[in-house]
Amino acid sequence: MKMALYKLIVPLLISLCLILPMTLASKFEYCGNKDYAVKVSGVKISPNPVKKGKPATFIISATTSETITGGKLRVDVRYFGFPVYGEYHNLCEETSCPVTGGDFVVSHSQELPGFTPSGSYSLTMKMVDGEGDELTCISFGFHIGSASSVTDI
């Protein structure tokens, strides 16, 4: 009896460990049908949904076969299709430079003002190298909810 239960529980736990990370990742799409030098493999948002007045972290997992010594990220945010925010970031402040080929992660954290409206947003991120050549461009949706009324102690 114990062995039969063990044979049932172990595969179930392994399946949950494999499925859970996929459910936490956000869907993304490329901006066009270009063959980008940087291939994005995943987008994670924490917390998800984003809470206004609290820090949010956007993590982009990617890979490249090129060496990237610098560049910029252009981030544009839309709310119901209307542009509400745009900014540039130094790529080397969001990942370790130089990127020498292979897998790398771009991570950006930002606290959203408490007056940010709740709802669905879309974010477009363009990555360009030091010469201004576009390395990749992706877009994904995210949701902003209200901040929790429970405070951490």
Image: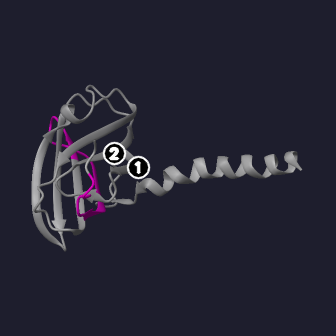
User: Which residue has dot 2 on it?
Assistant: 60
How many marks the image carries: the answer is 2
The range drawn in magenta is 127-150
Q: SS of the residue at dot 2? A: strand
Main SS, magenta region, reads strand
Marked residue nearer the N-terminal end (2 or 1): 1
* In this rendering, position of residue 45 left or right of residue 10: left
> Does residue 37 belong to the magenta stretch?
no
Could you tell me which residue is drawn at 39 percent across and 60 percent down? 27
Could you tell me which residue is drawn at 11 percent across and 66 percent down? 83
Q: Position of residue 2 (x, y in %)?
A: 85, 46
Circles 2 and 1, Cβ within 8 Å, touching? The answer is: yes
Kindly give the residue lying farthest to the front in the view shown: 153
Q: Compute the Cα span from label 2 to label 1.
A: 6 Å
Q: Nearer the viewer, residue 134 or 96?
A: 96
User: Which residue has dot 1 on it?
Assistant: 42
Q: Position of residue 63 (x, y in %)?
A: 39, 39
Q: SS of the residue at dot 1? A: strand
Q: Nearer the viewer, residue 56 or 153?
A: 153
Q: Nearer the viewer, residue 56 or 42?
A: 56
Could you tell me which residue is drawn at 50 percent across and 54 percent down? 22
Q: Can you tell which quarter of the image residue 142 is in?
A: bottom left
Q: Position of residue 15 (x, y in %)?
A: 65, 51
Instruction: Name the amino acid type tagged 2.
Output: Ile
* In this rendering, position of residue 77 left or right of residue 102: left
Is residue 147 depicted above or below 93 in this figure? Answer: below
Residue count near mark 1 (Cα–Cα under 10 Å), binned few <14, some 14–19, many ≥20? some
Instruction: Name the amino acid type tagged 1.
Output: Gly
